[in-house]
Image (cartoon, grey):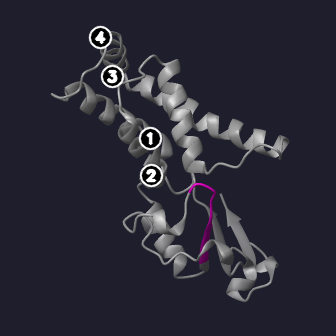
Amino acid sequence: MALSPTPRALFFDVFGTCVNWRKSVTSELLAQSHAALDSATASLASRVRLQASNMNEATENWATFAEQWRDSYRQFTRKLADDPSLPWISVDEHHLNSLRELTTQWQIEGLWDDEQLRQISLIWHRLEPWADSVVGVTLLSTLFGMSIIAVVFRPTNISSHVYPLEWQPESSFRPSRFQQDPIHANLLG
C-alpha cells in the first residue's frame, strides 16, 4: 500500500514491535529460577524450592508470570492517569515492586535475594529482538529518518546488537527534528 504523501521519517513504538518481550522475560525468569535452585549456596525454604521446581516443569508457568508482570504495568499507568496525586515512581521501581508482589502471589518469595530481584527486574532493558527486526530497521533507515518512542526504553539502555542504529534522544521525538512536516512522519507500532 502506497502512502501519500510518502513518509520521510518513521517513529517506532519499539515495545512488542521490534522486541520479543514475552520470550525474553519468560526465558530470564526460567533461567534465574534454575540458577537459584541449582545454587550450592542458596538456602531456600522447602515450599519455595518445591513451588519453583513445579513452575520450571512447564515454560507456560513462567510465561503466565511474565504476562501478569506486564499487566501490572498497564494497571500502574492507569492508576497514575486516574489519580495525579499518587507519588511518582520510575518504571524501573514499578517493575521491581511488582516482581516482588508476584513472587509473593506465586509463593516463591525468597527464591531470589534483593540484588537478584533488582537484576531480574531490569530484563525490560535487555529484551531480545524479533529475528527480522535488526535487518528490517537497518534497511528502513537507509530510506527514512528514524527514531523510537517508548516508555520503558531509553536509547542508552538499548543494546547495540538489537538496534544498530544511532537512535535520537527522547527530546527529539518530533517530526521537526527531521525538518519534516508532521504529515511526512509515520508512527510504526
Q: What span is in magenta?
A: 146-152
Residue indicated by mark 4: 46
Label at residue 127: 2
Residue indicated by mark 1: 25
Q: At 45% from the left edge and 16% from the top edge, which residue is drawn?
A: 107
Quick check: can you spot residue 1?
A: no
Is residue 95 rendered magenta in the image? Answer: no
- Disc 2 and disc 1 in contact, CB within 8 angstroms: yes
Q: Residues within 10 Å of mark 3 (few under 14, many from 20)?
A: some
Q: Nearer the viewer, residue 24 or 90?
A: 90
Q: At 80% from the left edge and 78% from the top edge, which residue is drawn?
A: 182
- Disc 3 and disc 1 in contact, CB within 8 angstroms: no
Query: How many numbered marks are there?
Result: 4
Q: Quadrant of the N terminus?
A: bottom right
Q: Name the image quarter holding residue 164.
A: bottom left
Q: At 75% from the left edge and 72% from the top edge, which residue is drawn?
A: 3
Look at the picture and state if 112 lies above or below 147.
above
